[in-house]
Image: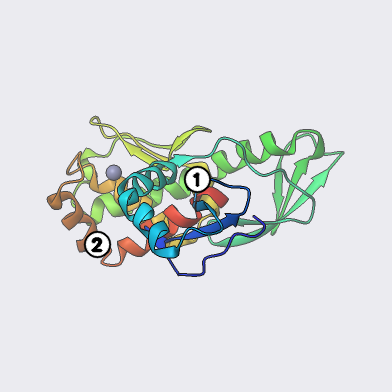
Amino acid sequence: MSGATNPNGWQVAGIPVLVKRSDRRRTVALQVKPGEVTLYAPVRVPDTKLLEILNARRDWVAGHLAQYARMVPAAPPSLTGGQPLPFLGDTLTLCLDPAATRPERRGDTLHLPAAHADAALEAWTRHAAHEPYRALVAGYATQLGAQHRLRRVLVAEAKGRWGSCTASGDIRLHWRLTRAPLPVLHYVALHEAAHLLELNHSPRYWAHVARVMPDWQAHRAWLRTHGHTL
Ligand SMILES: [Zn+2]
């Protein structure tokens, strides 16, 4: 965004609060988008007043950021040939191939049918992620002593949350997590596996998570800040 800066270092939930002043504005407005907070203000409103407005609505802003962070955006970025594709800690290179009829990985190159590259990439990723996801979740379930409660591990649909766990022991992880740094994917797998023991976010639940992954908070923070880019 042009003209927006973060001169005072203000943040909400680790997201910098951008300030955009304009002499055409009469009122102060606060806008929250995924991973982005902007204060629109008239030129003459002092910083102290802006900070007062921000502080008064801090919980509201944090609530919206958290809500966005839990949701997976619907529209993936469009693909180009030669583009690097993070996949479970590796980096593949995309090749959009007009002659290809279905996705195929050869070495570190992923060939996709050029005519329907986006759909082919999602289908390939969901298929390729299934076994690694299953092994990852099963490993954490075992570490937690909850392996007997785990039923199925599924690769989640196009929309929804990063992960989920049902009372009957089905765990879903989103296919786009294949593009996250491995420790972040591990955190989500552990997060859902720990729900096999506690189907809530109580202190007891977080104690299970922290027992296995003491630095879990850094990975959750990464998802909140960068999840919309996956
Ligand atoms: Zn949870």
**In front of the other: label 1 or label 2?**
1
Relative image position of residue 198 (x, y in whole percent): 17, 43
| Helix, strand or loop status at disc 2 | helix
Secondary structure at badge 1 equals loop
In percent of width and height, residue 93 lies at: 72, 57
Which residue corresponds to mark 2? 212
Sort mark 2 into few (<14), some (14-19) or many (20+) by Cα contacts within 10 Å. Answer: some
Judging depth in this view, the residue of 147 and 12 nearest the camera is 12
Q: What amino acid is labelled 1 in the image?
A: Thr
The quarter of the displayed image where residue 50 is located:
bottom left
On residue 27, the disc is 1
Query: Most extreme residue toward the left, as rendered?
Result: 204
Is residue 230 among what the camera can see? no
| Quarter occupied by residue 161 | top left
Residue type at tag 2? Val
Label 2 CB, ligand 1: below 8 Å? no
Q: Please state if 103 lies on the left or on the right of 41 as rendered.
A: right
Q: Is residue 168 above or below residue 67?
A: above
Cα distance between the residues tagged 1 and 2: 49 Å
Total marks drawn? 2
Q: Taking the image as drawn, is residue 49 in sight?
A: yes
Q: Nearer the viewer, residue 167 or 215?
A: 215
Residue at point 28% right, 32% down? Answer: 166
Q: Does 91 sit above or below residue 59?
A: below
Q: x and y percent of residue 185 in the render?
A: 43, 54
Which residue appears at 20% of the width and 38% of the height? Answer: 199
Along the horizontal axis of the image, is 90 left or right of 161? right
Residue at the far top in the pictured view: 168
Can you give x and y, in whole percent of width and height, for residue 118 in the image?
69, 38
Q: Nearer the viewer, residue 45 or 101?
A: 45
**In the rendered view, does 55 fall on the left or right side of 179?**
left
- Would the CB of label 1 be found within 8 Å of ligand 1? no
